[in-house]
Amino acid sequence: MPDELTKIKDEALRDLENIRDAAALELARIRHLGRSSELSQYLRTLKERTADQRRTLGKLANDARAELEHLYDDARARLADTAEGLAGKLDVTAPGLRHIRGHIHPITSAQEEINGIFASMGFRIMDGPEVETDFNNFEALNFPPDHPARDMQDTFWLKGMKNLMRTHTSPMQVRFMQVHQPPFRIIVPGRVWRNEATDMTHDFQFHQVEGLVVAPRGPQAPSMANLKGVMEHFYRRYFNDADLQVRFVSSYFPFVEPGVEVFLRGTRGKLAGVWIEVAGAGMVHQNVFTAVGYAPSEMQGFAFGNAIERLVMLRRGIDDIRLFNGGDLRFLNQF
Amino acid sequence: MKFSWPWIKELSGVFLSPHAAAELLSSKAFEVEEIGNDAWEIKILPNRPDCLSHLGIARELCALDNARFAAPSYEYEKSVHPDVRITVKDTEGCPRFSALIVRGVKVGPSPAWLSAYLETCGLRSINNVVDVTNYVMLELGQPMHAFDLRHIPELVIRRAKVGERVRALDEARTEYELDPSILVVADGSKALSIAGIKGGADSGISDDTTDVLLEAANWDPVAIRAASRKLGLRTDASIRFSYGVDPNLTAPSLVRAGELLARAAGGTADRAIIDAYPTPRLPWQITVDPEYTRSLLGTDIGVPQTRSILESLGFGTEDRSGKLIVTVPTRRSDVSGAEDIIEEVARVYGYDALPSIPPVFPIYDEKGWVAGDTNAAWDEYDIIRERFAIARLLAGAGYSEVYNYAFVPDGTKFELAQPQSSEYRYLRTTLVPRLLTNLRDNLRFTDEVRLFEAGHTYASIGEKEPLRLGIALARRSGGSDVFYELKGALDLLIERIGIDDVVYDDAEPFPWDAGAVSATGAGRRALLRIEGSGMIIGFVGAISSGVAEELKLKGSAAVAELDLRALIELAEQENEFEPLPKYPSIIRDIAVLVDQGVKVDDILQTAEDAGGDIVEDVDVFDIFLPTGEEKLKAEGDTPEYGKSVAFHVIFRSPERTLTDKEVDAAEAAIKAALTEDLDAKIR
């Protein structure tokens, strides 16, 4: 670039740096880019050069002009903002206007999430009554009258009636199978009651989600290995932990055989590195199939039951189950 | 149940650390809940009566540890001419009654080897004779009882007579009144002990007893559990008998007790036992198809390993043309089907070794509902999802969801037989009372509370339980604005659901739950009714000051309750698209002064009717109750307690652009009708 042009450009830039208001900017623009500016004069003098020089120097001068115009435009926009800002500058650290926000109960959110995970596996989501009969809650589930297994579930009976508050969501297995033929897969989220002393981990009212998967016997009938697969898939998604492990431990529930307790071990939070019991599960007992009217030895399937509170407590780090039914917004508004 | 680890170790002969043994038991058999120094707490579930004994646990542990279990064997013979005649009058209640006479014992304190194990297991040492019976119960699982032979010329096993009494062999000598559902061991005239549950005070061992009759009987589990519950008496014996004890255990237990008595109390046992066992329980057989085992478990354990596992647990096995014939020992009353056998194999094999495999399924159910009661299971995913959507809407509007217990202190319908406390006595028929308590409790921490709850209420058995949605609002200071704010939330909700024909009806009495209605003030509440059908979908009201005072709710509050299922079912038709308007609207504002008793709804309805087809909408924008001074300023014959209502009337035709002239005419007609029908003063 010829010295002359460099000098013109440098002067324009230097002026630009020192400008603090729009009026000064306009004066500077006229001085450096206006019709009688040095740059314009320089361009006019190019006529007198050779065609070759005209081409090279003309390009250099026009590029310089374009660049300066661009910089002056930017400066104008910046100064305009500043001018406005001086009058109505915002303190961006002041709090936003408060909107009232309500909160959904953590058990509701959990149910919705759980329903979604199982619906994505083709499970149907069923509901049913909370006041049940002895037959649905116990007898059809292979708890004969005066069987000691009944002592495992302390029951709220209704006064002067043969009805009870369901002690688990499993009576829905009976209700559903009485009117459906396999193959099917369902879950039943719902509220249950146990008439037992309450403490940090026990409340007399809580929620379960029941699962039931049944198909005719055959090569692809649901197996215990399938139960493990479904459980693993569910917990990995619910706890958002792809490395979570599921372990079965021998146990006894009258309506499944074999019956197991389901333990989890995850990689973070309360589940990190420890085995924690979360559910009961097993292969549906043939006596249950008989009680709902299926022909003996024709069906095969698995069932499982989770306490939803327990899953939420593990995931959210809640240490007292009684908070869920306490109606205290200081707790509920955290979710 | 409490166990002694040294005892288990001694009987099993395993070389395992306590922790290794506990881990094996916990994962494959029973949860070891607590490991003390020597005392363990192991949770034996009701399916395994055989393991309510140290020998049972030892046998299990050997099988799990793949160690050989040396079962003790006790030889005995039966007495042909017994010294005590035993008559079993109820062989169903008492399938077996065995006894052994031990003579010349010296009753006294137990030697240390005897009392030590008992104490580890939480039993107090009483004397050498009683301690021996308890020792055998803990070791072999057979509850026993020792009679003083002097008191029992004969034994009769029968049902108790009405009002028959027995004094129990406990410290308080508690007297129990019996009835014919309860089995007793009696002599010729009176009941001596409550069968399978508790011995009697008058026939037991005393310091001067020399000859002892040991009883080892087998009782019907159902009868024992029922009697134990009826009497409120749970004992080590009753627990074992209700789980179900092997009837073949009585004789070996007597022999073992005879041995121990000789060592601990110097007695001499008779050579033969007295035995009433009309129908001996024999081992039974179950056929297991290895293919079914593979299918049920989803993995192949193989026949050789299956057999070796079963044999380690004491089952007999035989391969008969590809099928496995399994012989079940009589102590395993829990094993009755192929699945029970498969469970035994699977748990010992180890569930950890089970692979996890995704199931293969058609992507939708092919058969589905077949027949029968459609009300049996509620296929209500739409309602469940809509409930979540409503929760989100209300949360967005500032309301927080609570869950309450379904039990309330007051009620008329369903009462619990054994409530936890008087606070939780009845099944709720409405959500309102608990919501009011929630309002009060939360007002202690904040000036303003907005709540909702959705849940079942209990109106009748056998029908679908009503699904209710309760919404409540309270403010520490404020007046009737809480009612209108809550009504605004209801309007939002009803609009979201897509119902447009709800009317608020304040004509009393209200066919709604009295517990909800009585919380609100007369003249400050309304039913939500569907116009036309008259169907009632809910209730809303401002809480009366009396109720607020009684509750100590400091502030003003309003509450609403809706029939959620009805609401959602009403909304089943989706919102359909309406074409955007093609022609402009003309809006006129009208303000009227009316008597305070005139309802806003009447004004709007009158305006809409009088304006004709071209009225698209009538929309209130201001309601004003003039105060004294302003009232004076109003001109003319202002009604004394007037209220001012201002509203927009939106005129539009779907077919053409309206002219000012026709809108003027309609506006005039509206004003005339308001003046005429409602005695309104146009402002």
Image (cartoon, coloured by chain):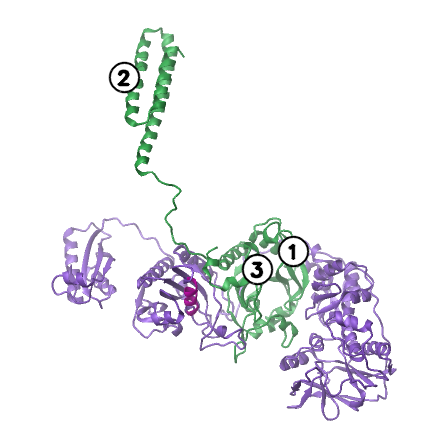
Chain colours: A green, B purple
In the image, residue B312 lies at what x, y percent? Answer: 79, 63
Residue B189 appears in the figure? yes
- Rendered view: B680 above or below B217: above
Task: Look at the image and give the residue range highlighted in magenta.
Answer: B433-442
Q: Residue furthest bottom?
A: B189
Q: What number is the disc on residue A35?
A: 2
**Residue B363 relative to residue B90: left or right:** left
Q: Secondary structure at mark 1?
A: loop
Residue type at numbered disc 2 = Arg
**Mark 2 or mark 1, earlier in chain:** 2
**Chain of the residue that carries numbered disc 3 in the rendered image:** A
Determine whether, in the image, residue B100 is placed left or right of residue A296.
right
The answer to whether the residues at label 2 and label 1 have Cβ atoms under 8 Å apart is no
The disc placed on residue A310 is 3
Q: Is residue B306 toward the left or the right of residue A44 in the image? A: right
Magenta segment main secondary structure: helix
Secondary structure, mark 3, is helix
